[in-house]
Amino acid sequence: MKRIILIGIIAFTTGLGACKKALEVDPQQNIKAEDAIKNEQDVKALVIGCYSIMGGGALYGTNLLMLPDLQASEGYCSWRGTFQSYRQVANKSLIRDNTEANRTWTAAYRAINNANLVLTNLDKVTDVDNRKLYEGEALFVRGVLLFELTRLYGGGFDPLTANAQLGAVIKNTPTTDEAGAFAAIPRSTVAQNYTQVIADLTTAVTKLPDENGTRVNRFTALAFLSRVYLQKSDFINARNAANTIIGSGYYGLNPVPTAVFTNKNTKESIWEIQQNDQNNAGNSNDGMATFYASLPGIGRADVRMSTAFINAFYEPTDARYDGWYYVGTGARPGNTYCSKWNAFEQNLPIVRIAEMYLIRAECNRRLGTNLGDTPENDLDVVRSRSRASFIAAPTLTDILNERRRELAFEGIRIHDIKRLKSATGSFPWNDNKLVLPIPQREIDATSGVLVQNPGY
């Protein structure tokens, strides 16, 4: 059996046959993807496969939420676990073969490959509405994961430069056979990555319906577009996308801040990863509750919260202080942990309406506008839900502080540090140690077509 270690390699699985390892190809024993996809049900299986991969521990099930916390752990949290791969991330001592960097890269391109297979087989979908839906979902997956890869492996977007630094590989055609698996594609620039991400998500917005059950819809794509635009300091478009979501009336804050994490698919969630007792990211070596919780029988208590960070925003009436943080009673008792992630079977909110209010508030304040509402009122929507005090005429600093408090430990921190050009401890926003290494096996297999990041 040949072992191939190039980007985007995946045996055709996701509901149509037994799984193979992502980096193995066996042409003698497997049907080529273009031959296996026969009808609409096969295409639907590929779409569902995308969600399954995204919910795994390598992506939104753990790493895309936890790695940005650990990358900016100084004064925020600390890693107390035994996994050296995560310790390297927290200590800024990554090696080029870091396990988490490797598996996140690989899983993202597996899902992107599924998305590309969907897009190249839409002619097999006879139902017009389903064809449009699957196209929108596939474009969403491809755009969102390229965005995440760019932020983690390509560094920060600087609106004052051409962003010619290398980002991720743009892969818009599927790998379906051994020849395609051996094709070596160079990394595109960060600027090119953002252009592709925006194109995919913008088209997805036009294809996705307003409602799509627990799968992504038009507003999910808009929410990620708002994030993308905010990351590149395009405050007008970030504000406009957030304003459309808020104005839709589909979403609203729950009465108490804990409800979005203890209940599934509440009106506060724009999109969340679906989990249950039998199907979740993990309860021993993966999963947010596994690493963040310290309760009897639940969690390894590997990520400890900094009390200095929490106390910096303390208000005696703010329900988030006691609702989101607690002293552990399970593994490593007596330390402070985040109760956002407390159950193996809980859904994982990826983007919430509170974030959209804070984006609109920030952008309106920066632009000197009041589109949709004033920054004062938007900030108060978030704060009053938690019984925090009213801030009259909030400054940009007030809004950014609220963002740090409301979205803490949800995978936002390092990305905000980079876009705001600040620092984590002694590491400035553009330090090479805040960028993940490209898997070295990919570098080796392409004979240098893929270029490694500086410092690795």
Image (tube, helix red, strand yellow):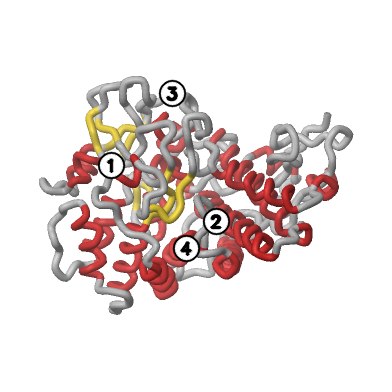
Residue under pointer 2: 144
Frontmost residue, 293 versus 129 = 129
Marks 1, 4: nearer the viewer: 4
Contact between marks 3 and 1 (CB within 8 A): the answer is no
- C-alpha gap between disc 3 and disc 4: 39 Å
Q: Residue at x 41, y 43 (%)?
A: 71
- Residue on which the image places disc 1: 75
Residue displayed at 56% across by 60% down? 165
Residue 451 lies left or right of residue 281; in this view the side is right
Q: Position of residue 280 (x, y in %)?
A: 50, 34
**Rendered view: 103 above or below 48:** above
SS of the residue at dot 1?
loop
- Residue 187 falls left or right of residue 279: right
Q: Tag 3, which secondary structure? A: loop
Query: Mark 4 touching mark 2, by CB under 8 A?
Result: no
Q: Residue at x 61, y 62 (%)?
A: 136
The amino acid type found where label 4 is placed reads Phe
Residue in front for this viewpoint, 94 or 253? 253
| Disc number lying in front (3 or 2) | 2
Image quadrant where one finds the C terminus: top right
Point 32% across, 21% down: residue: 296
Tell me whether circle 1 and circle 4 mark residues in contact (CB < 8 Å).
no
**Circles 2 and 1: CB distance less than 8 Å?**
no
Q: Position of residue 246 (x, y in %)?
A: 36, 67
> How far separated are the C-alphas under marks 3 and 2?
31 Å
Q: Which label is found at residue 258? A: none
> Residues under labels 1 and 4: Cα distance?
34 Å
Residue at the disc numbered 4: 219
Q: Nearer the viewer, residue 413 or 393?
A: 393
